[in-house]
Amino acid sequence: MQIPGNVLDVLTDPRTVISGDRVAVPFQLDPALYQRMNKMLKDIGGRWDGRKAVGAHVFPFPVEEFMRACLAAGEWPSRYEQGWYPTPPKVVFDMLEHASIRVGHTVLEPSAGTGSLLKPMAEQMGIVDCVEIDFRRAHVLRELGLARQVILGDFLDLDPLATDEPYDRIVMNPPFSDAIGHVMHALGFLKDGGTLVAVMPESITWHSDRAAVEFRKLIADNEGEIVKLPADAFAPSGTNVRTVLVCLDADPDGTLRTHGWHRRQPVQLDLFAMA
Ligand SMILES: C[S@@+](CC[C@H](N)C(=O)[O-])C[C@H]1O[C@@H](n2cnc3c(N)ncnc32)[C@H](O)[C@@H]1O
């Protein structure tokens, strides 16, 4: 999204302080201009904190480099375009309960945003790899210094067979616009015996399109779990989309297309050719 010229002027004004997790504008703006700036900062994840000691928009991640990149380009990555809805703390808690990350588990976060899931997973001593399509968010992830690696790129372009090391856990909050596509692709990176936990729009439980019907069958066939989240679970992130958690354990005898399944394919195809 293009930053309006007068908002750009305010944010690049030498008196404006952009530091750590805060953006503070210590001079008076007319109400219309303030609203325009507030809209942009909220879209990036900031919340106005009017307490005397703060008086700034506060972000749930280090915002300095992120803002520098936005201001240099004159635009910001809109949450609407890239589906950036950070996982609220209560949902993170539920996801980690289901994921049961143990010390040394390898964990993939394939749509990592600014690290709402990365931080607690690293605290649980998981060895976390992140993928993020937006370079500004990928930069934030790198700055946090908690991931083993941060891959900047489109997760859907990554080839599961390009890695020899599938993951013990995959914990993800994919863009809701293609949540099934992301989860199906992520399974290709999961170890047999591993667990995937994904937050997904509730619509996957009732949509009648083929992808949703097949996805529900896959969950049922593999004794997966769909856990309804409270209707307002994502309200702190600015959306009323109803959500569920999908938890899948990869049984080697199941039908999930895990990393092992992909590895087994050439053999199975050869056998098929001989039949
Ligand atoms: C719903 S947000 C979740 C962010 C983070 N996982 C969290 O919980 O706070 C989805 C994130 O996926 C990123 N994203 C969207 N499409 C992607 C893709 N194809 N590959 C990698 N990341 C993608 C967006 O930029 C956004 O940061």
Image: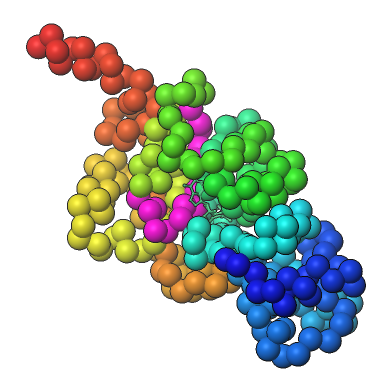
Is 210 in front, or is 65? 65
Give the magenta range.
166-180
Q: Return the residue found at the far top.
A: 274
- How far across and down, in percent of the image, does residue 211 sit? 25, 50
Q: Is residue 167 rendered magenta in the image?
A: yes
Point 63% across, 38% down: residue = 150
Q: Return the residue found at the far left.
A: 275
- How far across and down, in percent of the image, does residue 218 sit? 26, 44
Point 54% across, 41% down: residue = 153
Question: As displayed, is residue 229 above or below residue 269?
Answer: below
- Locate the N terminus by quadrant: bottom right
- How far across and down, in percent of the image, does residue 12 sit? 81, 68
| Left/right of residue 185 with respect to residue 221 in the rendered view | right
- How far across and down, in percent of the image, does residue 40 sit? 64, 72
Question: As displayed, is residue 74 above or below residue 126?
Answer: below
Q: Return the residue found at the far front.
A: 5
Q: Is residue 191 rendered magenta in the image?
A: no
Inspect this view and state whether residue 119 appears: no
Point 40% across, 46% down: residue = 182
- Locate the C terminus by quadrant: top left
Is 111 in front, or is 193? 111
Point 49% across, 42% down: residue = 154
The quarter holding residue 207 reads bottom left
| Left/right of residue 76 with respect to residue 52 in the rendered view | left
